[in-house]
Amino acid sequence: MPKFVTIGYGDREGYDRTPEPLRTEAHAHDDRLRAAGAEMGIAGAPVQVRNHENAGVTVEDGPFQKSALPVAGFAIIEAESLEKAVELVSKTPCAVGYGVVEVWPWQSAQG
């Protein structure tokens, strides 16, 4: 079955203004996704890693990409199609709580 990487963006303000029953159901939905095999995690503090021309590793704190909302978490889900993946993530806390979720089709790297 196809896999998808999801990136949830959201902030506390949007989450807090979402009615409690909707937040509770969104978390229950995440629990059902995990029970079905989705791997989910909350985003920690990122670092940037560079090793240009294999000449030495440098590490800097902070994200490379910027967005209006902070990254809240990631998941890897399985779904029959992109449309089904969108349906699955449309009920998650970031989507429901005034955030946004990106859905990226997973493509295996060819070595």
Image (spheres, rainbow, N blue to C red):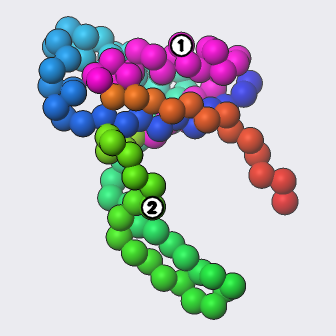
Residue 72, position as x, y percentages in the image: 34, 40
Left or right of residue 6, residue 92 in this image: left
Q: Which residue is mark 2?
A: 64
Residue 66, position as x, y percentages in the image: 40, 52
Q: CA distance from mark 1 to mark 2?
A: 29 Å
Mark closer to the observer (1, 2): 2
SS assignment at label 2 = loop
SS assignment at label 1 = helix
Residue 25 versus residue 68 in the image, above or below: above
> What amino acid type is highlighted by mark number 1?
Glu
**Residue 72 seen from this side:** no
> The C terminus appears in which quarter of the rendering?
bottom right
Q: Mark 2 packing: few (<14 Cα in 10 Å), some, or many (20+)?
A: few
Residue 21, position as x, y percentages in the image: 20, 8
Residue 88 lies in magenta, yes or no?
Answer: yes
Residue 31 versus residue 58 in the image, above or below: above
Residue 28 lies in magenta, yes or no?
Answer: no
Q: Which residue is mark 1?
A: 87
In-front residue for pair 85/40: 85
> The N terminus appears in which quarter of the rendering?
top right
Q: Mark 1 packing: few (<14 Cα in 10 Å), some, or many (20+)?
A: few
Left or right of residue 58, residue 68 in this image: left
What is the span of residues highlighted in magenta in the rendered image? 74-98
Left or right of residue 9, residue 5 in this image: right
Q: Earlier in the sequence, mark 1 or mark 2?
A: 2
> What amino acid type is highlighted by mark number 2?
Phe
Q: Residue at x 35, y 64 (%)?
A: 62
Q: Residue at x 48, y 21 (%)?
A: 89
Task: Residue 63: give its label.
Answer: none
Residue that lies at the very extreme toward the right in this rendered image:
111
**Residue 57 seen from this side:** yes
